[in-house]
Every structure is written in C-alpha cells, then in structure tokens.
Image: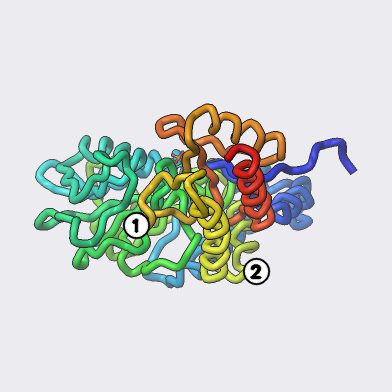
C-alpha cells in the first residue's frame, strides 16, 4: 500500500514505540474526528467533543490505577522536567524539608530543582556505585518530618527499578514514574503525587500525566505561587489550552491498554519480555548486566559486552537487523533495550535471537 519500509523493532528509551493499532485508529480519525466535521486538533477545548474525550482519558487512567474521586488526574505540559520544579514549588519553602531518594540522573535533576525552594534531605544515594542499584528499606534514613518523600520508580538511564514502594511510615510519596507509569499495579494509597511524561508508556511526547491525592492537593500552597505553577489552578478546571491532540493519543493508548487487560496484564507481559532478555544475558559471561540483579528494571534493560569495540559492532549489526535504538545513554555507554508497554514480545524475541547469534559468532 505504501513505499515506506516496514516498521522496525523499536527499543527507544523515549519517545517510545506506540501500538500500530493506536496509530492506525488515529490515522483513520484524523481528518474528521467521530464525524463532527473537524480534526480533534481543530476543535475548542471547551467543546463537548473535547470535554468528553478529556473525561474518558482521565477516567481510564483512574480505572487502571484503581482510584476514584479521592484523586485528581491532570494533563499538563512542560514534561516531567517541569514537575521537578512544580512539586517543590507547591509544597516547599524556606524552613520546610522534603526527602529525595537519589537513584539516578533524573533523581539528581529533581533534587537540583527542589533545592531552589526549600531543604532537601537525601535518605539514600547510589551515586557512588554509578546508580547501579535502588535501596533496601533499611538503608533509607528519612528526616524527622518531611513534607513528602520523592523517588524515581524506574531509572531509565541506569536500568534499575524499585521492586516496590519505599515504606515512609505514612509520609506521602511524590513519584517520578515517567518510565514505568501503568506498567504494573502499584500501591496507589501511598502516593501524594505520581507524575509521568506520556512518551514512554502512555502516548506521545507533549503531555505529562499528574495524579494527585485530593487530601495532599489541599496542602499545596494557595498563595505566592504563579498561577500556571499551582496544582490548584489545574485541578479546578482546564485552565488554559491543553495539549489536546496528545491527550487524544493518550486516550487511545489507555483504551488499547484496557482492552488488553490493564496493568495486571501489562505487569505479566512486561515481566515475560524482560525475562526473555535477562535470561539471555545470564547464560554466560558474554553479556554482563549493568546493574545489581535485585534492582533490575523491567522497562530498561542495560548490559555490557567485553569491550566498546564489540559493543559498537553489536549496535551496528543490530541495526542491520532492524533492531533499533539499543545504544546505552551517553553517560553510561553499553547497550540499553527499552521494553515499555507497547514494545511487543515479537520484537523482544527478535532481539533475543540476535543476541544468541551474536554470541555464537563473536564468543
Ligand atoms: C524521560 C524521563 C524524564 C524526562 O521527561 P521529560 O518529559 O522529557 O521532561 C524524567 N524522568 C524520568 C524517569 C524519565 O525517564
């Protein structure tokens, strides 16, 4: 039908691959959204059609998280990086403290922003080991009375992931879940805020999903904060023009995920995909996992070969086999395979087969 080449096996860390079904539905609906006579990009965000779609997207996210009216879902702009400043802007000031667990590059960036607003206490850092692991519960030294505890549930660059939430003794968690949002069930009651750029697990770049527990929202600053930076502004109503097409894409992605079976389905699926690659890594010493085994991520699998020349050869030959975007982050090197919700087992099997063949030919 077209002269485009086939879609490649896409292991991009983000923006990440989307399901073909979702892209095709968007294509089909693009010029005339649900017969209203215009594209979803061309209609008012105050129109019934948009309000309905916004409501659907929020409701689907709530359903998948298993939450009701005690939480608010927001669609904001500025990426997860803007949440690094928005969270402390709303909850910190001179004399107040928040705890920030430092497990990687993104946590470090969040800490830098929080320090602009108040005190930051770091209960644990794995910086010394190049962020090769997440903490055990008994390694967390929290401060006495923090406003919240911030953590990065999945560390996209290093390839580590918290197997479960840190236990804060009831202090609300604020979580950057950009690279594992809706990839598995979580204990949502523990979270004051969970935020994620959509572009890894949930849709295209350009919209950030922010979920706030309403009793935590009430504690957010009411005064002395710019309107657009205040969670209250966005929780009350759609305040300004939202990234409407991106919200539309998130809604399609949520529909696709619900049809598959929601977060329970994706946990199992993601676990199987990750296991396929970790098993291949662990067969012998040819490949070496880059992080501690009990901190391994189900989303971003990082590994090394014996030397950089061999890694370069691996990447080059992978690309020739349509296995794309496997280069590790420039700060760590090596190989990184990102297996988010929309990455298919078929792609993972192709990667596993390639890894086995590459070992045979170069071992
Ligand atoms: C990708 C990523 C970010 C950055 O998100 P932006 O939307 O580009 O600001 C932040 N945190 C984590 C964990 C990420 O994976």
Q: Is residue 44 left or right of residue 336?
A: right
Q: Is residue 6 left or right of residue 214?
A: right
Which residue is nearer to you in this view: 76 or 176? 176
How much space separates mark 2 and mark 1, taking CA atoms?
A: 26 Å
Residue 195: x, y in percent?
Answer: 40, 52
Q: Residue furthest right?
A: 1
The residue labelled by disc 2 is 259
Which residue is nearer to you in this view: 26 or 52? 26
Q: Which residue is located at x 56 percent, y 51 percent?
A: 339
Crowd rating for badge 1 (residues with CA inside 10 Å; few <14, some 14–19, many 20+): many
Figure quarter occupied by ligand 1: top left
The residue labelled by disc 1 is 193
Q: Is residue 25 left or right of residue 89?
A: right
Q: Which residue is located at x 31 percent, y 39 percent?
A: 130
Q: Which residue is located at x 48 percent, y 56 percent?
A: 298
Where residue 270 sits, quadrant-wise, is bottom right
Q: Quadrant of the N terminus?
A: top right
Which mark identifies residue 331? Answer: none
Report the number of discs.
Answer: 2
Label 2, secondary structure: give it.
helix
């Amino acid at each position: 039908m077209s002269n485009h080449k086939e879609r490649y096996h896409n292991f991009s860390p983000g923006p990440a691959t989307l399901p073909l079904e979702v892209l095709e539905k968007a294509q089909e609906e693009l010029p005339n959204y649900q017969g209203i006579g215009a594209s979803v990009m061309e209609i008012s965000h105050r129109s019934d059609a948009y309000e309905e779609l916004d409501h659907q997207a929020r409701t689907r996210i709530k359903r998948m998280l298993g939450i009701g009216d005690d939480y608010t879902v927001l669609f904001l702009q500025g990426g997860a990086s803007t949440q690094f400043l928005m969270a402390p802007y709303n909850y910190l000031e001179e004399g107040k403290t928040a705890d920030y667990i430092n497990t990687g590059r993104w946590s470090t960036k969040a800490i830098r922003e929080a320090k602009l607003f108040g005190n930051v206490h770091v209960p644990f850092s794995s910086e010394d080991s190049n962020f090769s692991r997440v903490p055990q519960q008994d390694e967390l030294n929290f401060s006495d009375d923090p406003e919240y505890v911030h953590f990065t549930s999945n560390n996209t660059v290093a390839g580590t992931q918290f197997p479960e939430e840190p236990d804060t003794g009831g202090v609300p968690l604020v979580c950057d879940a950009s690279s594992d949002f809706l990839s598995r069930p979580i204990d949502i009651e523990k979270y004051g805020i969970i935020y994620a750029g959509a572009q890894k697990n949930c849709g295209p770049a350009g919209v950030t999903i922010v979920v706030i527990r309403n009793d935590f929202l009430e504690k957010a600053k009411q005064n002395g904060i710019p309107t657009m930076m205040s969670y209250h502004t966005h929780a009350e109503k759609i305040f300004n023009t939202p990234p409407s097409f991106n919200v539309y894409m998130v809604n399609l992605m949520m529909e696709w995920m619900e049809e598959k079976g929601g977060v329970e389905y994706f946990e199992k699926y993601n676990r199987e995909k990750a296991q396929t690659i970790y098993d291949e890594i662990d067969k012998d010493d040819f490949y070496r996992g880059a992080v501690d085994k009990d901190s391994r991520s189900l989303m971003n699998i990082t590994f090394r070969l014996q030397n950089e020349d061999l890694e370069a050869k691996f990447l080059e030959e992978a690309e020739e086999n349509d296995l794309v975007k496997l280069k590790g982050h420039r700060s760590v090197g090596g190989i990184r395979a990102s297996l988010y919700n929309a990455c298919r087992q078929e792609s993972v099997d192709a990667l596993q087969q390639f890894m086995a063949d590459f070992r045979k030919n170069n071992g």
